[in-house]
Image (tube, rainbow, N blue to C red):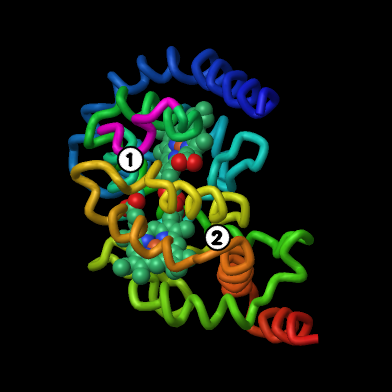
Amino acid sequence: MLQMGYNIARCMVNAMRTSLSFSLLILAALSSTAHAGADPAKLQTGAALFQNLCAACHGPKGQGNEQLKTPSIAGEPAWYVQIQLGNFRAGRRGGNPAEPQAMVMSAITKNLTPAHLEALALHIEKLERMHPPMPTALRDADVAMGKELFEVRCMECHRFNASGEMTFGSPPLLGLQDWYLVAQIEKFKTGRRGAFVGDPNGAKMVLSSQFIEDEHAKRSVIAYILTLNSAPADVERVFEASSK
Ligand code: HEC
Ligand code: HEC
């Protein structure tokens, strides 16, 4: 915990030293382009903002970093990123001192304008989605049970293959690391995410996460979600392994 706190603090400091002060200058210079409207300009602005303000923690390709507890956000749809950045900015995510990771994000987004958030979201969507590996710790999970739970309790909103559904506000669950999925499900279950006024999408998850009844169910559904990242041949292998 101490180590994690230290890492986040160090990352914050690094991000601030190497990026924030410098970037505030850039922000001023860029804000005219951010408002310009043309997509190529927005993308360029988004890329510059990302490298300066986000890459220190999320990685230059948006691949995430387990030590810093940053999710791999590469390829997340722009609509979802924008909603989350708005949630962080308003403190619906990160408004609680028990949430050090989300608080960091909340602080960062408070310095950004809606035009910056839009430009960042467009850039993140263009980054290539990661293929997180099945961690050794989940190799013995009950993937078949996870599949069943997913089909009954999650698929309605997150859709077939967990590809997400914009009209429901439910994001793809692909590309996300196992430990991040665990952490978010815990946050929803305990109302540390999704239980704030003005977060109707989060509220859906506070409810839905209650159907993940115990540790076994959580491990199983997460293991199943991770198989959806694999090439079809790999999915077969994972199922074979889990049914032995
Ligand atoms: C100091 C480290 C740090 C920096 C810098 C940082 N983030 Fe984050 N970010 C995090 C952490 C930690 C989380 C996980 C929060 C949680 O667990 O709720 C996160 C979560 C997110 C999420 C939520 C993803 C999801 O799937 O819901 C998005 C989107 C995001 N960050 C975008 C950005 C953008 C854009 C920037 C740059 C403007 C940025 N972050 C800068 C640490 C950082
Ligand atoms: C009623 C619709 C609905 C159902 C059913 C549902 N979800 Fe969600 N889920 C959502 C919405 C909407 C969000 C976005 C929440 C937000 O904006 O913070 C979400 C977000 C998530 C996230 C956070 C992703 C991220 O990038 O931070 C995870 C993990 C997740 N859902 C897993 C599940 C699992 C596992 C199930 C089945 C047990 C499930 N969901 C069932 C609607 C649903």
Residues tagged 2 and 1 counted as in contact (Cβ below 8 A): no
Gap between marks 2 and 1 measured at Cα:
19 Å
Count up the numbered dots: 2
Q: Is residue 76 left or right of residue 31?
A: right
Q: Is residue 75 left or right of residue 115?
A: right
Q: Which numbered marker is on residue 68?
A: none
Q: Which corner quadrant of the image does residue 177 belong to? A: bottom right
Q: For the residue labelled by badge 2, is the local secondary structure a helix, a strand or a loop?
A: loop
Sequence-first disc among 2 and 1: 1
Note whether 172 is above or below 19 in the view shown. below
Amino acid type, mark 1: Leu
Q: Residue at (19%, 45%) from the top-left corner?
A: 198
The spot of residue 144 in percent (x, y) is: 63, 82
Would you say the beta carbon of the disc 2 residue lies within 8 angstroms of ligand 2? no
Prevalent SS, magenta region: loop
Per the image, the residue denoted by label 2 is: 175
Crowdedness of circle 1 by 10 Å Cα count: few (<14), some, many (20+)? many
Note whether 71 is above or below 89 in the view shown. below
Would you say the beta carbon of the disc 1 residue lies within 8 angstroms of ligand 1? yes
Check if residue 92 falls in the magenta segment. yes
* Nearer to me, 46 or 88: 88
Q: Which corner quadrant of the image does residue 204 belong to? A: bottom left
For residue 48, say whether it is visible: no
Note whether 231 is above or below 38 in the view shown. below
The spot of residue 99 in percent (x, y) is: 46, 32
Ligand 2 shows up in the quarter that is bottom left
Q: Is residue 240 left or right of residue 35?
A: right
Per the image, the residue denoted by label 1 is: 85
- Report the magenta residues as a range: 90-97
Q: Residue furthest front?
A: 213
